[in-house]
Image: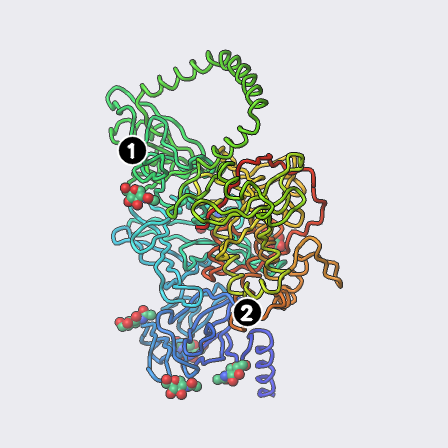
């Protein structure tokens, strides 16, 4: 009878708890047991599982903890992260003295918990929090060793990050070296105890990103409105040390924070509905998150142009350098403070507070007392509330220079920056002056408009030309040379032999395309738009069409082997990244599609046709437009339906391009006969049915490159997700394509099958110029 029960237990255990076990150990490991290759230890409620695993190389075995019922397998802790075991002969065992050890068949002990205890009967237990603990068999508490004391790259609920107030951080996250090597990487995520404590991500000793200071509820660097409702963070400061942890307010929420191998910290929440890890905030998120990007006494505004601005009353230390977008020297005061005869304070609202590593703080003061305190100390330059919770205040003071402050939308705090009182007079004067000037301004404006209308009607064509030049003038030059070349009409006439028929490559709906040779020997393709074609530029700028090379000519498609195709996709991603981020102006292309990708002689892709592009110089990251223009099949739902576009609209179009290049099919016009799905729907279906390889175009490929192609499909699907906020930004995409970033599971793509607004293209006819985007 008893034996019978045991067999039953084993079966139950096997079926419910372990993925592929030969033998499954229950929740507790005792000294006469050991865990080997396929054995696993399962937590009481079955949330976590611990055992050996590898990343495809059986010669590198790790002992770790992962979520039991979550696929793909997600590791939260690795014991022997720096010392993988050689092969299947490795085992984990508990010594009689109470040490947990990993033995390698050939090398003996390769990892040791160093936790021996006398007078106990040690057992190992995996708790449902994901904590692996050693304790006395008879006691429920009193763990004498626990994995939570040795964090890896994952911060779980209940874990504590700790720092000693004198010696600094001693328990913190460290990144993996790469997604398949858990060895200690170069990034750390820890609490810096200098001044007023703050969370930082550092590479070695260099701070890369500041997670902000504690505001009574949490560290303010990341977005927290949503988090606050589901997680309870706490920071406990004693006179010796501080510890930071969080708890889930809802026991059924599964969440983890990970410091990835590239230094990005990201929180994920498991969604039962979609069965994916939904990423919430990810930091650093943009340029303004780069530590001290704008130098001292400045403010970073990601929607500003440029993103760095001096604080009011300050000016760039070195004007030309500042203007060339090197902000590292920061700003200096225009007027010196006059400590004795009164200075004032200028409030900045909704800020991520500046670096507090040299700050002074007091928990009991009121904001008014805080101000007085700051005024009394001549080197004090700013003050703010310490604690944002209702009914609390406290005081936080900064001295000398302000570093690493940014606008933080609706989640920031107010900070009061000290200014010489004369600066205030100056400001007031400016305001009066402005008011008086309004009338004059209105009159001037009316005259201005009249003149402008006149000029426009006379010089319309010229103005178009000027506008283009103006637009590009603001673009940063990259090291390789000019980003954009503008040719004048004469040089193009010469290059194409006065548009001779012999140079004609072909003719599209809106005009002929000519081959031209510039004076320096460079070959170009020129499209001449006919005067009558009011409909503007048509889909193809010339006959060097990527789609054609990909699809129609078999000789060309041999040329475009898979390596080349993937390189092209990578090149397009980099091009878009440049537009979105690297260039001084943030540019949203709005019409990314295959036919706007030109390949040069070396098959290097260049993004062309900026007819619809919008640059963002104002304070907007997203905009709405009444005329939805773009190309059917490439427009994301939020743009096609609501006319709202952002950089994530381009990401969507890029995703479509990726899937098109890989499948060799066009999204619009494609119809999977059985399911009546468009290309995105088809790709999604194949993905969830776990046969993405069927999407790959009928061009021979090596087995070796197959997984890479599938990774590209994966990235493509991430880009075309329904919700813009779920789509990665282009810098993540570039990492993802390289395989240097963990890929979340995609959610359903945004299917769109509305109509193409044919008349809507708002491209200005311009027969005199052609712009080429040089490759980086
Ligand atoms: C481990 O499991 C795999 C797959 O189930 C099996 O092929 C292998 O023989 C097992 N190895 C050991 C050492 O039990
Ligand atoms: C494991 O490695 C040891 C030494 O490297 C070797 O002797 C042994 O045969 C290997 N076992 C397996 C199953 O590969
Ligand atoms: C245990 O102690 C040894 C010897 O001091 C050390 O090399 C090893 O890193 C320690 N193990 C752990 C897990 O810290
Ligand atoms: C543990 O408890 C059992 C009975 O519950 C007892 O027989 C045993 O002596 C205890 N062991 C220790 C080390 O206290
Ligand atoms: C968060 O935890 C603290 C103590 O750890 C507790 O006082 C507080 O009530 C908790 N907040 C919520 C919203 O549960
Ligand atoms: C906890 O989360 C689950 C799943 O997200 C949800 O269904 C449930 O309503 C939540 N409970 C509370 C008390 O918020
Ligand atoms: C900006 O200037 C600093 C100091 O002059 C220099 O070290 C740094 O490399 C420059 N940064 C860039 C992006 O050119």
Q: Position of residue 709 (x, y in %)?
A: 55, 65
Rendering quadrant holding ligand 3: bottom left
Task: Please state which of residues 500 and 379 is positioned toward the viewer in this rendering.
Answer: 500
- At horizontal 41% and vertical 76% (from top left) the residue drawn is 60
From the viewer's perspective, tell me whether residue 315 is left or right of residue 712.
left
> Which of marks 2 and 1 precedes in the sequence?
1
Q: Can see residue 470?
A: yes
Residues at marks 1 and 2, CA–CA distance in whole angstroms: 52 Å
From the viewer's perspective, tell me whether residue 443 is left or right of residue 194.
right
Q: Position of residue 533 (x, y in %)?
A: 67, 37
What residue would you read off at disc 1?
A: 318
What residue would you read off at disc 2?
A: 706
- At horizontal 75% and vertical 62% (from top left) the residue drawn is 673
Badge 2 crowding class, 10 Å Cα cut-off, few under 14, some 14 to 19, many 20 or more, is: some
Q: Position of residue 624 (x, y in %)?
A: 60, 36
Task: Please state which of residues 506 and 308 is positioned toward the viewer in this rendering.
Answer: 506
Looking at the rendered structure, the secondary structure element under dot 1 is loop
Is the CB of the residue bearing disc 1 within 8 angstroms of ligand 7? no
Picture quadrant where residue 312 is located: top left
Picture quadrant where residue 451 is located: top right
From the viewer's perspective, tell me whether residue 298 is left or right of residue 540.
left
Task: Please state which of residues 681 and 165 is positioned toward the viewer in this rendering.
Answer: 681
Above/below status of 223 relative to 138:
above
């Amino acid at each position: 009878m008893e034996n019978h029960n045991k067999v039953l237990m084993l079966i139950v255990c096997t079926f419910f708890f372990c993925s592929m076990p030969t033998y499954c150990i229950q929740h507790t490991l005792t000294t006469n047991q050991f865990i080997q290759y396929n054995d696993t230890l399962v937590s009481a409620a079955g949330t976590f599982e611990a055992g050996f695993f590898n990343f495809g190389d059986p010669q590198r075995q790790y002992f770790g903890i992962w979520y039991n019922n979550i696929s793909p397998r997600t590791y939260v802790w690795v014991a022997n992260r720096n010392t993988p075991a050689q092969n299947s002969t490795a085992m984990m065992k508990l010594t009689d003295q109470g040490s947990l050890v990993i033995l390698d068949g050939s090398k003996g002990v390769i990892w040791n918990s160093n936790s021996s205890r006398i007078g106990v009967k040690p057992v190992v237990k995996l708790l449902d929090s994901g904590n692996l603990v050693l304790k006395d068999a008879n006691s429920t508490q009193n763990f004498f060793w626990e994995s939570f004391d040795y964090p890896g790259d994952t911060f779980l609920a209940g874990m504590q990050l700790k720092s000693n107030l004198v010696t600094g951080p001693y328990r913190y996250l460290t990144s993996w070296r790469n997604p398949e090597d858990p060895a200690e990487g170069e990034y750390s995520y820890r609490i810096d105890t200098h001044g007023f404590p703050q969370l930082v991500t550092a590479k070695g000793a260099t701070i890369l990103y500041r997670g902000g200071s504690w505001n009574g509820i949490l560290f303010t660097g990341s977005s927290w409105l949503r988090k606050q409702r589901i997680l309870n963070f706490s920071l406990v400061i004693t006179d010796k040390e501080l510890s930071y942890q969080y708890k889930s307010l809802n026991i059924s929420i599964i969440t983890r924070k990970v410091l990835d191998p590239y230094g990005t910290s990201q929180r994920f929440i498991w969604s039962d509905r979609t069965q994916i890890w939904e990423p919430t905030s990810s930091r650093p998120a943009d340029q303004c998150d780069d530590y001290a990007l704008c130098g001292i006494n400045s403010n970073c505004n990601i929607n500003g142009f440029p993103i760095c601005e001096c604080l009011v009353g300050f000016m760039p230390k070195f004007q030309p350098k500042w203007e060339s977008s090197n902000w590292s020297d920061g700003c200096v005061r225009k007027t010196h403070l006059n400590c004795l005869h009164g200075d004032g304070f200028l409030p900045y609202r909704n800020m991520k507070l500046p670096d507090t590593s040299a700050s002074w703080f007091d928990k009991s003061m009121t904001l008014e007392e805080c101000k007085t305190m700051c005024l009394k100390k001549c080197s004090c330059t700013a003050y703010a509330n310490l604690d944002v919770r209702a009914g609390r205040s406290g005081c936080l003071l900064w001295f000398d220079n302000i570093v690493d402050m940014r606008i933080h939308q609706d989640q920031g705090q107010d900070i009061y920056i000290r200014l010489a009182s004369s600066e205030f007079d100056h400001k007031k004067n400016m305001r009066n002056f402005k008011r008086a000037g309004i009338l004059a301004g209105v009159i001037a404006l009316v005259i201005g408009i009249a003149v402008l209308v006149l000029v426009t009607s006379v010089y319309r064509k010229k103005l178009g030309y000027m506008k283009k030049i103006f637009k590009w003038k603001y673009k940063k030059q990259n090291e390789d040379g000019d980003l954009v070349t503008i040719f004048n009409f004469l040089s193009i006439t010469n290059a194409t032999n006065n548009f001779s028929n012999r140079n004609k490559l072909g003719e599209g709906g809106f005009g002929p395309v000519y081959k031209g040779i510039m004076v320096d020997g460079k070959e170009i393709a020129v499209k001449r738009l006919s005067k009558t074609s009011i409909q503007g530029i048509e889909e193809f700028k010339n006959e060097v069409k990527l789609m054609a090379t990909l699809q129609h000519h078999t000789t060309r498609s041999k040329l475009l082997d898979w390596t080349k195709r993937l390189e092209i996709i990578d090149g397009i991603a980099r091009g878009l990244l440049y537009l979105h981020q690297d260039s001084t102006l943030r540019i949203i292309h709005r019409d990314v599609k295959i036919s706007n990708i030109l390949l040069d002689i070396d098959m290097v892709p260049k993004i062309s046709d900026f007819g619809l592009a919008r640059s963002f110089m104002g304070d907007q990251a997203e905009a709405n437009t009444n005329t939805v223009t773009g190309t059917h099949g490439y427009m994301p739902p939020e743009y096609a339906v609501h006319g709202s576009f952002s950089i994530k609209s381009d990401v969507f179009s890029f995703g479509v391009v990726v899937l098109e290049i890989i499948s060799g099919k066009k999204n619009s016009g494609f119809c999977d006969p059985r399911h009546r799905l468009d290309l995105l729907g088809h790709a999604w279906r194949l993905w969830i049915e776990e046969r993405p390889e069927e999407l790959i175009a009928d061009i021979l490929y090596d087995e070796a490159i197959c997984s890479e192609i599938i990774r590209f499909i994966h990235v493509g699907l991430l880009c075309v997700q329904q919700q813009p906020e779920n789509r990665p930004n282009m810098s993540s995409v570039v990492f993802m394509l390289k395989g240097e970033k963990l890929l979340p599971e995609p959610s359903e793509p945004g299917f769109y099958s509305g109509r193409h607004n044919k008349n809507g293209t708002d491209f200005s006819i311009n027969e005199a110029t052609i712009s080429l985007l040089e490759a980086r």
